[in-house]
Amino acid sequence: GEDVEQSLFLSVREGDSSVINCTYTDSSSTYLYWYKQEPGAGLQLLTYIFSNMDMKQDQRLTVLLNKKDKHLSLRIADTQTGDSAIYFCAEIPLNNNDMRFGAGTRLTVKP
Amino acid sequence: DVKVTQSSRYLVKRTGEKVFLECVQDMDHENMFWYRQDPGLGLRLIYFSYDVKMKEKGDIPEGYSVSREKKERFSLILESASTNQTSMYLCASRPGGNSPLHFGNGTRLTVT
């Protein structure tokens, strides 16, 4: 079956920008989400974008959506060591009760 | 804020034991979910429930069962734990529609 796809690892230096990419599966998905998981914790909702938007900015976070290519990205400006975590993208297809997740991208921020 | 509480952060059980993982949410959400998380595999859905006493199989239900006797509580049961069930288990809830999931902090289960 189709999967929500993300690369597994990303390493950046403190102060640089991080870009985490995701390809989702269902063009009917109305909202697309980014979650953050810190070590030993559950997933925390970070941000989301409605499918009729191209971009959403929230402080250091920018979400870009390309519906034609079903591509979603999360940019973190001025990345800090506290941003080190696993980031998951997720979708809820229309008429589906389940949320589909990517495998998660582990972001490592080096000082 | 929505609070999803999992009763244990860490559990160590022996092969063959019956294991109960408990989850409680305080926001009257209709839908509750159990996932397991393994390195490189992301989150895989075990079971979900959209109402009291209702349950649906997810992607990997084998070896698990669930119980939802009250709206706020969703239990995951391992009838006879096996070592391949060693994993992080995450409970989540949400209301209907396109609302996002709210997660508990997870239970790390080790089966020896």
Image: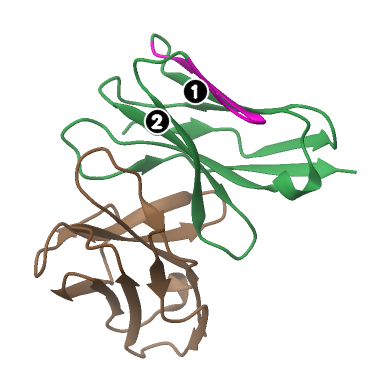
Chain colours: A green, B brown
Indicate the secondary structure of the residue bearing disc 2.
strand
3D distance between C-alphas at marks 1 and 2: 8 Å
Residue A77 spot, x, y in % from top left: 72, 28
Q: Chain of mark 2?
A: A
- Residue A59 within the segment the image draws in magenta: yes
Q: Is residue B24 left or right of residue A81?
A: left
For the N terminus of chain B, the image quarter is bottom left
Crowdedness of circle 2 by 10 Å Cα count: few (<14), some, many (20+)? Answer: many
Classify B51 as above or below B100.
Answer: below
Q: Report if the CB atoms under discs 1 and 2 are less than 8 Å apart.
A: yes
Residue ID at (39%, 13%): A67
Q: Is residue B31 left or right of residue B25?
A: left
Q: Residue furthest right?
A: A111
Classify B67 as above or below A45.
Answer: below
Indicate the secondary structure of the residue bearing disc 1.
strand
Q: Range of the magenta residues? A: A55-67
> Which residue corresponds to mark 2?
A32
> Which residue corresponds to mark 1?
A72
Residue A20 spot, x, y in % from top left: 62, 30
